[in-house]
Image (spheres, helix red, strand yellow):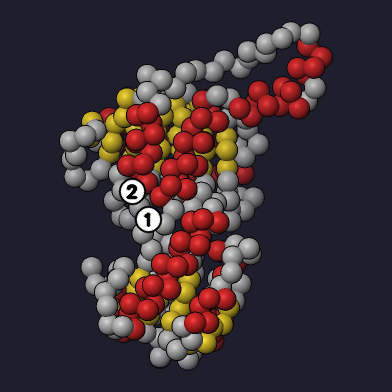
Amino acid sequence: MKIVFLDALALGGDIDLSSFTELGEVEIYGSSTNDEIKERTIDCDVVITNKLKLNETTLSNAENLKLICVTATGFDNIDIDYARSRGIGVCNVVGYSTNNVAQITVGFVLQLINRSKEYQRSVSSGFYSECGVANVLTPTYREINGLKWGVVGFGNIGRSVARVAEALGCKVFVNKREEISEYNCVDIDTICGECDIITLHTPLNDGTRGLINAERISKMRDGVILVNVARGAVTDERAVADAVKSGKIGGFACDVYSTEPFDRNHPFYEIMDKDNVILTPHMAWGSIDARVRLLNEVKENIKAYFDNKIRNRIDLK
C-alpha cells in the first residue's frame, strides 16, 4: 500500500507521521500545487490531505487511488460526487477537536468582553506604573453573567460551547436545523436581533454561505460580540469588517477565512490591529492533543477501509 500526505505542513511541523509506515510505503509532502497533486497521486492507494482541493482535475492521473482521508471534519474541499463515480472511498474525522475549538471560542469571548488587550497594554506600555492610580478601570467592561449568548450550529462544538456559556450564567439561544428541548431554539434572525454574544459553529454549505451578512448585522445589538470558528465564508467578511470599523460590532474574533492565508487585500487586513479584534491563523482545532487524536483516527480509517469495514465514510452518505 502506498500512502501520500499531500499537505503535511497544515498539520504542523511538530507532529510525528512515522507511525504510518506500519501501514505501508509513505511519501510526505509539506504542500502541493494542483500540478504536483497530479504527479504525486499517480500510483498511490491512499491520499491524505487537510486543505487541498481534490476533484476530477487534480485526481485525473490517480488511477490506483482507493481512499481519500481528510485530516479534518469538514470536507468541502473534496468533490464527493466525483469520488463516488470513481469508487473512491472518502473518510473524515469527527470529534477530535471538539474540546479545543470550544476552549478557544470561550477564550475569545472572555478576552473581548474583558477588554484584555487594552488592560494588558496599560501595564506593558508603562502607563500603569506612571499613572499614580492603583486601579485603572478604563475602558469599561461588562460581566458576562446574564448576557444572551447565541450559538449558531449545534454539533459537538456548538453543544460544548453552550454548556460553558450556561455555566458562566448566560441565557443560551441555539440555532440549528432541528429543534431541541434543552435550549431555547430560535431562528438566525432572532439570534442576531437579541443576543449580546454570537458564536458561529456551523458547517459551510449552500444554506450557510453568507449567513451573517450586512442585513443581519444591521439587526444586531450595538456592541455585539461576534466570533467565527466555523468557516470564513459563513460571514460576509467585508460586511463584518465595515461593522467593526463603525462600532456596530463591539468585539470580533475569527480563526477561519474565505481565503487562507488571507492577503493584504482581504477586508480583515484593515481591522487586524484593532483592540477589539482577535484574528488567529486557523489554529483553534490544533492542540498537540487534538492532532495526535486526529492522526490516530486517520490510521484507524485506513485500516478499516482495507479490512472492508465502514468507518467515517462520507462517500456512503
The residue that label 1 is drawn on is: 95
Q: Answer left or right for 108 relative to 179.
A: right
Camera-nearest residue between 236 and 47:
47
Q: Residue 65: x percent and y percent?
A: 40, 86
Q: Residue furthest top?
A: 133
The answer to which image quadrant residue 69 occupies is bottom left
Q: Answer left or right for 310 relative to 118.
A: left
Q: How far apart are the alpha carbons under marks 2 and 1?
A: 7 Å
Pointer 1: residues within 10 angstroms few (<14), some, or many (20+)? Answer: some
Q: Residue 126: x percent and y percent?
A: 80, 22
Q: Which quadrant holds the C terminus?
A: bottom left
Residue 70 visible in the current orientation: no
| Residue drawn at the location 47% of the way across and 23% of the way down | 223
Q: Answer left or right for 138 relative to 90.
A: right
Q: Three-letter amino acid code at disc 2?
A: Asn
Asked if disc 2 and disc 1 are in contact, CB closer than 8 Å, the reply is: yes
The answer to which image quadrant residue 175 occupies is top left
Q: Three-letter amino acid code at disc 1?
A: Gly
